[in-house]
Image (tube, rainbow, N blue to C red):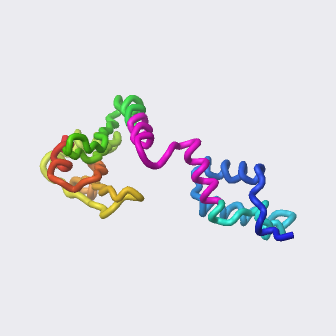
Amino acid sequence: MLLGLHSCQNNHKKDYYDLFSQGQSPATAHLEYETNLMYSDKPDLIADRNCNPKLSDVYNLFNKWRKCNIGVRTGKYLFAELEKFVAVYNEEYNDIGGKTFIQRYSNCSGKEEPLILAVCIPLMSRVHRHIMQSKELVFIVASSSFEDYNNAMFVVFTSSAAGGLPLGIVVTSAESVYCYSSRND
């Protein structure tokens, strides 16, 4: 019988789902699972796809797990989950200075409004309050793309005697003056 043609058993899928729940990526979960198999009392199971799925199968398991536990990666459901996360974050961290803002991407009536996600964690709020030059002197570190969506990410800093201190993070789908000026508060 060809061991490489079997599909992964449910008890092994559960083991992978547990690793994903702990924050592991598909690659690190697969590496840990294979390592555990090698040091088990039956190391020959590493050749059995029924017990040790291929990495592509692990990625498929991860995508199923993510869809059930985190949500989809694209479309209106992604924005709905992101808006829920922003609302929960603002509710939980508003008292200590954490705040977020989201503007959903829209292309209605020929007028495009880009996605804008602005984040200010409590540490950043303290920098705004206590470092006086944060109102006048900033520098920006920009990325060229962010994940699969080709969004730009900007981290805004100010200078201090201790070095650069963070003021905020902005993720946007367009690099225009509107994006930079619309959430400068």
In the rendered view, does 37 fall on the left or right side of 178?
right
Residue range corresponding to the magenta coloring? 58-85
Residue 31 in the image: x percent, y percent? 66, 65
In the rendered view, does 15 fall on the left or right side of 85?
right
Tell me which residue sits at (68%, 53%) in the image: 16
Residue 61 can be seen in this image: yes
- For residue 160: magenta? no
Q: Quadrant of the N terminus?
A: bottom right
- The answer to whether residue 62 is above or below residue 3 is above
In the rendered view, does 4 fall on the left or right side of 156?
right
In the rendered view, does 91 fall on the left or right side of 157?
right
Q: Quadrant of the C terminus?
A: top left
Residue 110 in the image: x percent, y percent? 20, 45
Residue 147 in the image: x percent, y percent? 41, 58
Tell me which residue sits at (74%, 63%) in the image: 52
Viewer-nearest residue: 65 or 143: 65
How many marks overall? Answer: 0
Tell me which residue sits at (59%, 55%) in the image: 24
Residue 159 can be seen in this image: no
Residue 129 in the image: x percent, y percent? 23, 39
Viewer-nearest residue: 8 or 97: 8
Q: Quadrant of residue 90?
A: top left
Q: Name the main secondary structure of what is drawn in magenta.
A: helix
Tell me which residue sits at (16%, 48%) in the image: 178
Viewer-nearest residue: 93 or 174: 174
